[in-house]
Amino acid sequence: MKSEISIAKKRWIRPLSERLINKIAAGEVIERPAAVLKELVENSLDAGATRIDMIIEKSGTRLIAVADNGCGIPSEQIEIAFARHATSKINDFNDLENLRSYGFRGEALPSIASVSRTRMISRAEGAETGVEIIVEGGVKQSLKPVTASFGTKVEVENLFFNTPARRKFLKAETTEARHLTRNAIALALGAPAVRFSYALNERTLFALDESHADLKTRTAYLLLGKNQGSLFEIISQTEKMEIAGFLSHPEECRQNQYSLFIFINGRYIRSQSLNHAVTAGYGEVLPRGNYPVGAVFLTLDPSKVDVNVHPTKAEVRLSDEKLVHDLLYQAVKRSLRGESLSGADGIAPPQKSVPENYSINEAIRKARAFEPGEMTGSAHSFLRELYGPSNSVKAHAESSSPGPEPAPIASAARTEKAKEPVSLSDADPACYLGQFSEMYLLFKIREELLIIDQHAAHERILYEEIQRVMEQGGAISQNLLFPLSLELSADRYLLFEESAECLQATGFILAPFGGRTVILSAVPAALSKKSPEKIFLEIIDDMEIIKKAGNDFKKGIAQSIACRSAVMAGDRLSEEEAYSLLRRLMLTEKNYCCPHGRPTTIRITRSELDVRFSRK
Ligand code: ADP
Ligand code: MG
């Protein structure tokens, strides 16, 4: 590196070495481990593979391996495959206009090999033996015949070992893991006939077989766990464009948009405009901030799509983007309506039964191993839960007894008036006047009217409680009558793993159960009135947004749980609950605002009213 720079200083003009060119190109083509995975798998698909195994270690920085049963590369050509702009896929400009393969630039292999140690073993159809080539930092290390099965296997080790800047810019391993997983899912969705497996950091996150060959099963398996019933088909055929795919019903939507995959002519693309078209197609049935889950395939005249915009090819240029947007929007709208007319009540509820091979001892051992601290669910209650009347009954919390009752107001009356508008002492008797608009609680306190936003206030209370138990321990869990066995999608499973420890600290009791299954056996007491599965999944989805925004993880979890479990606008509160909310709000540290900064309370004094009524 150093010598190359000093040559530049002498101002000699000379061509760059092939090695350096590849390294520079690698900066463009290979932005992160996920890009390597995509290039390798696309090569396998171009080679006609019907089986592709992906193995990732240390989120791609140690190993990215892809093995296929495709056509292979003849021994005498394997070295050329690593030469720049060498491709078997296009010959002339015409081919580029009517592209049918994923690859065409002949850039991926040389780029990858220039910034890693790459080993490729391949045996071409009909060949007697295989061949192995090792290229490190763009330099061939060895080339020799080996015994091998038909197909190709590429192992990329030590990615970016010779580009320290790039290596440094890699995000946290967990972030890279999510990018890898998203690409793996997109690739598997895009080629439904191919049996894919994907193992990340020693766990198999998905393994597809013949039973996942149809798109609906595959979409459900990859994006929703197993819940097929909640997908509807989207289908539309017009002169300009064909649309096919499966999308989730509104109730299965997610709080982030990373589970919507859009493909154009078989290629996974990212497009804000098309994401919008799908989301807008749901109209009002999709609550704000929710996004559909699913895979949508658009087929249009290849000459109307320019895939040549960017080397990573996730962005495409459409010659009539507005039209494509509108057709997609219409198709989603119509398909959703059609489905809700015909099959609204025929939707099978998600399976919640404990798996057949559920072993009690094993479950207890796992739960113990996972939560070294004190477990709320004793072995006894575990047994009872398992041998309950029916395993498949929707789980409910055992009782709805609330968390600890806070101490009376007097002990924690606030004094810093300027910053904290709510301050009461035990000499201030609050009189509850009622609930307004199922959202605001009205109290009379001496000569003042106190208006509380019930959601914001409850959020503040829960947020501080959760933060406290996260720091000091002592979370109160509510056992579920029946532990829930949740089969998560691959990306949700990753988020679960990352947040498990924090979630346990707040009172969730969770244990991995092999594959992507998680057993949820208790929730924080504050959540006892909500659907445990729904809340858990909502919180997991929030994690994605917190991660993406780079916010403090613990704080984010506390915020998310507080927000998800707080009473909502529209919840009717009893008088007793209203008083309790006020009391508990007074005990919080920042009782004037919710964790997002919105005010919890507004107070109107008698004299303010007098002014408004022109009495003063
Ligand atoms: P491109 O895919 O754009 O052609 P690459 O650098 O990715 O460029 O690959 C170079 C060539 O190596 C391909 O054109 C193909 O002939 C060969 N190749 C790469 N991977 C495989 C594979 N898994 N199976 C068969 N051939 C492969
Ligand atoms: Mg390629």
Image: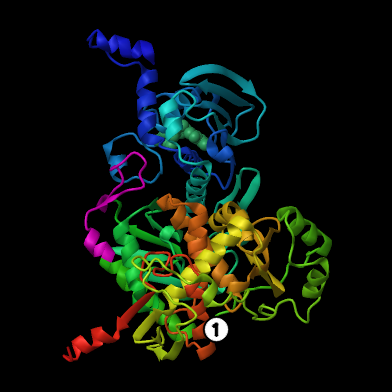
Per the rendered image, the range of residues in magenta is: 303-325
Q: Is residue 612 magenta?
A: no
Quadrant of the drawing holding the N terminus: top left
- Tell me which residue sits at (64%, 49%) in the image: 204
Residue 516 place in picture, x, y as percent: 64, 57
User: Mark 1 vs ligand 1: CB under 8 Å?
Assistant: no
**Left or right, 38 with reference to 477:** left
Residue 148 place in picture, x, y as percent: 65, 30
Q: Please tell me which residue lies in front, 553 or 229.
A: 553
Is residue 88 in view? no
Residue 572 place in picture, x, y as percent: 47, 88
Residue 574 place in picture, x, y as percent: 51, 90
529 vs 592: above or below:
below
Is residue 36 in view? yes
- Tell me which residue sits at (51%, 64%) in the image: 464
- Tell me which residue sits at (64%, 66%) in the image: 486
- Tally the numbered discs: 1
Dot 1 amino acid type = Gly
- Tell me which residue sits at (40%, 39%) in the image: 103
Q: Please tell me which residue lies in front, 405 or 395.
A: 405
Residue 594: quarter of image: bottom left
Q: Please tell me which residue lies in front, 317 or 238.
A: 317
Q: Please tell me which residue lies in front, 13 or 522.
A: 522
559 vs 74: above or below:
below
Q: Label 1, on which residue? A: 346
Quadrant of the drawing holding the C terminus: bottom left
Q: Secondary structure at mark 1?
A: loop
Q: Is residue 309 magenta?
A: yes
Residue 533: quarter of image: bottom right
